[in-house]
Image (cartoon, rainbow, N blue to C red):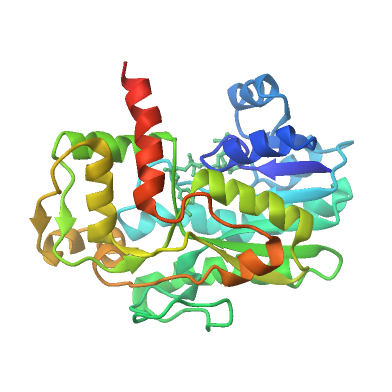
Amino acid sequence: MRVLIAGATGAIGRPLTQRLLAGGHEVVGLTRHDDGARRLQAAGAEGVVADVLDRDGVLRALDGVRADAVVHQGTALSRTPMRHRDLYPTDRLRTRGTANLLQAARQVGARRFVTQSFLYVYGFVDHGDGALTEDAPLGPAGGGRFDVHVAAMRANEQHVLAAPDLDGVALRYGFFYGSEPGTHWLLGMAAKRRLPAPRRGSAMSAVHLDDAAAATVAALERARPGQAYNVADDHPLTWTEYLDAVAVAAGAPPPPRLPDAAFLASPYLGTIITRASIRLDNGKARRELGWAPAYPSVREGMAAVAQTWRGGRH
Ligand SMILES: NC(=O)c1ccc[n+]([C@@H]2O[C@H](COP(=O)([O-])OP(=O)(O)OC[C@H]3O[C@@H](n4cnc5c(N)ncnc54)[C@H](OP(=O)(O)O)[C@@H]3O)[C@@H](O)[C@H]2O)c1
């Protein structure tokens, strides 16, 4: 299969590209930078330089390119989003970016389109103790300033799943972690004892990036058209447990506890960490994609990440 990936240079795009190439597929990666294209070529893929938000530019850059499938993994999260406005560029990639990539998919002759969605498509609220299946209603449920982010996630999914001429699939990933700068930074902060945790954080589902990449390849090969899949590990944790696992992996003592109010000073991040409890049921992805996470929980996965992090420090 020849796969066009928007976001091929990003946290999930890199292991996804490697996995596709190792499986005998061809990859064309979209990036905004010449340097990104060079890195893609060095990895064995092709690089095409274009900004996904520039419709005419993308279509021009892809003139003459053919692909069987398109994967949208474009986000703008290089810095951890703390405030609502930090999410707006990613919201645009999920609305205008998706619309432009759907046009690009038609131009390159693709049949399948897989898009990145996120666990908070179900809403930034407390979903209780049960794990959500894909049948759970989507947000908005938080109200106020969160609705714009949920609306962007929903628009992304709806455009892709309802595309009449494409086999659209949405992957509702849990929180990514893995051997990438963001997770290495967290381990470093824990090692320096500068990573605080809430006293009793809200719950969330996570997924190791290698497992997320494996699920994405499985979705390209086997997902049912028009379907959304939760892609998360087997054991949701509270944020307090997650940050404790980071500290254990870093060889540090448990992070100091702070009251919720200290986190809520960052309205977006604080709500996620202290209020918006959500656990994902991964049964549908297991059954229909034939996928299972190699790292059943963050505790095992973070220990593996810490090995590469330690290696990189010497
Ligand atoms: N589910 C999750 O938990 C989740 C999801 C996404 C990211 N994250 C986290 O966020 C952090 C940063 O993620 P990241 O390294 O993937 O970086 P990022 O800055 O979010 O970029 C992601 C990818 O999107 C591409 N991109 C962004 N805007 C684009 C545009 N206008 N046109 C074309 N491509 C565009 C980037 O390509 P170029 O820069 O090469 O153009 C890059 O390949 C990581 O720690 C990651 O784990 C978490």
The residue sitting at 88% across, 41% down in the picture is 66
Which percent across, then down, holds residue 98? 66, 57
Query: Would residue 91 appear left or right of 291 to someone viewing this image?
Result: left
Task: Tell me the quadrant of the picture where the C terminus can be found.
Answer: top left
Q: Quadrant of residue 165?
A: bottom right
The residue sitting at 22% across, 44% down in the picture is 247
Query: Would residue 66 appear left or right of 162 to someone viewing this image?
Result: right
The residue sitting at 78% across, 68% down in the picture is 225
Of 88 and 274, the residue lying toward us: 274
Q: Is residue 181 something one can see in this rendering?
A: yes
59 versus 188 height, above or below? below
247 versus 202 height, above or below? above
Q: Is residue 74 something one can see in this rendering?
A: no
Which percent across, then down, holds residue 110? 85, 51
Which percent across, then down, holds residue 202? 27, 69
Question: Number of labelled discs?
Answer: 0
Which percent across, then down, holds residue 198? 17, 61
Query: Would residue 247 appear left or right of 107 to someone viewing this image?
Result: left
158 versus 307 height, above or below? below
259 versus 255 height, above or below? below
Task: Tell me the quadrant of the picture where the N terminus can be found.
Answer: top right
